[in-house]
Image (spheres, grey):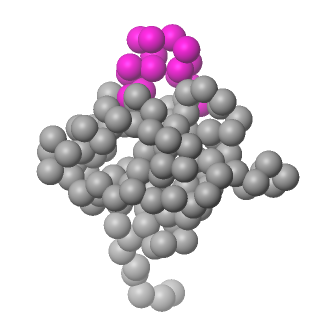
Amino acid sequence: MGDIVYMILVIIESPFAGDREQNIMYARRCMKDSLLRGEAPFLSHLLYTQCLDDNVPEQRTAGMEAGWEWIEKSNKTIVYEDYGISPGMKTGIQLAVKVNHEVEYRRIGKNDETRRT
């Protein structure tokens, strides 16, 4: 067994609402990009929407608020901005700034529609 490698914990902000298929594909690419940079990413919008309905306002709010609870537990927030910054992302960024959490912006390019990952 090798040495323990400590990864930094990051919150990933990327779009979800709108073109869900495109945004889920993009979020998965963001997660992969983050992992390959040696980070341990958390994408609440990919996790919580597996059991909560993003179209039901109370459930969307519950998922967003649960995701925001992780901000102070993580090292920084990474904003992937190739598809713009959605209202939900803006709120996450504002909360991160409010608690003096580092915010980094990245681009990885838009999805190649011929591939699924």
Residue 101 visible? The answer is yes
Give the dominant element type of the magenta stretch: helix, strand or loop.
helix
Up/down of 27 relative to 21, above or below = below
Task: Give left or right: position of 95 versus 20.
Answer: left
Residue 12 visible? The answer is no
Up/down of 34 relative to 27, above or below = below
Judged from this view, the residue extending furthest toward the right is 114
Residue 93 x %, y %: 30, 42
Q: Which residue is drawn at 31% across and 32% down?
A: 91
Up/down of 41 relative to 17, above or below = below
What segment is highlighted magenta in the picture? 50-64
Q: Which residue is more in the foreground, 83 or 92?
A: 83
Q: Residue at x 57, y 61 (%)?
A: 108
Task: Give left or right: position of 45 versus 69.
Answer: right
Position of the C terminus, as image quadrant, is: bottom right
Up/down of 113 relative to 68, above or below = below
Q: Which quadrant would residue 78 be assigned to in this image? A: bottom left
In the image, residue 84 lies in the stretch drawn in magenta? no
In the image, residue 52 lies in the stretch drawn in magenta? yes
Q: Residue at x 41, y 50 (%)?
A: 79
Tag count in the figure?
0
Judged from this view, the residue extending furthest toward the bottom is 2
Task: Give left or right: position of 38 versus 16.
Answer: left
Residue 16 x %, y %: 55, 33
Residue 87 x %, y %: 40, 28
Residue 97 x %, y %: 20, 45
